[in-house]
Image: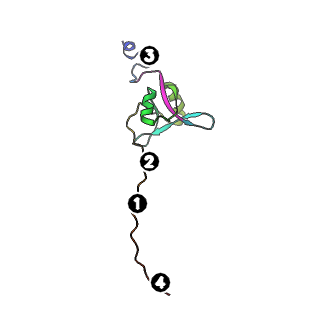
Amino acid sequence: MADALYGDDPEPGEPFPAGRLCVPVRPGPHASVTRLFRTPVGGRTAVAFTAPARLRAVLGADQPWIPLAEAALRALTEPLGVRDLRIDPVLTAPRPATTSVSLPEPLPRPLTALAS
């Protein structure tokens, strides 16, 4: 019965399907490396998306990514002490505005006599 509900999921109790995930990466000294993120409370987490469009919607069109299975991503991040994996996160901080803020002109200072 579980096979009918979860398809090719290797562990039927898992809420996410097995298969290819889109994992954000950053350039490393020899190859691309998995990008790690922080949770709202400061913990380290790996992030993956079920479709390239979801990754682009959250991280932007210029974010490089590689396809990885969930098991492979967990195997890469576990030696780093990262056991948390967020799939298709949508709650992220907004990007900072690129416009500059103009500061008010300083008030003129009164002239004072110099003591000689």
Residue wearing tag 3 = 8
* Labels 3 and 2 touching (C-beta < 8 A): no
Q: Nearer the viewer, residue 108 or 62?
A: 108
How far is mark 3 from mark 4, CA to CA?
Answer: 85 Å
At x 40%, y 23%, the residue is 14
Q: Amino acid at mark 2?
A: Thr
Magenta stretch bounds: 16-25
How far is mark 3 from mark 2, CA to CA?
Answer: 44 Å
Q: Amino acid at mark 4?
A: Leu
Q: Earlier in the sequence, mark 2 or mark 4?
A: 2
How far is mark 1 from mark 2, CA to CA?
Answer: 16 Å
Question: Element at badge 3?
Answer: loop
Q: Could you say where residue 1 lies in the image, as x and y percent from the top left?
A: 36, 12
* Labels 1 and 2 touching (C-beta < 8 A): no
Residue wearing tag 2 = 98
Q: Amino acid at mark 3?
A: Asp
Residue wearing tag 1 = 103
Q: Residues within 10 Å of mark 1 (few under 14, many from 20)?
A: few
Of tags 3 and 1, the one toward the viewer is: 1
Q: Quadrant of residue 79?
A: top right
Most extreme residue toward the bottom, as rendered?
116
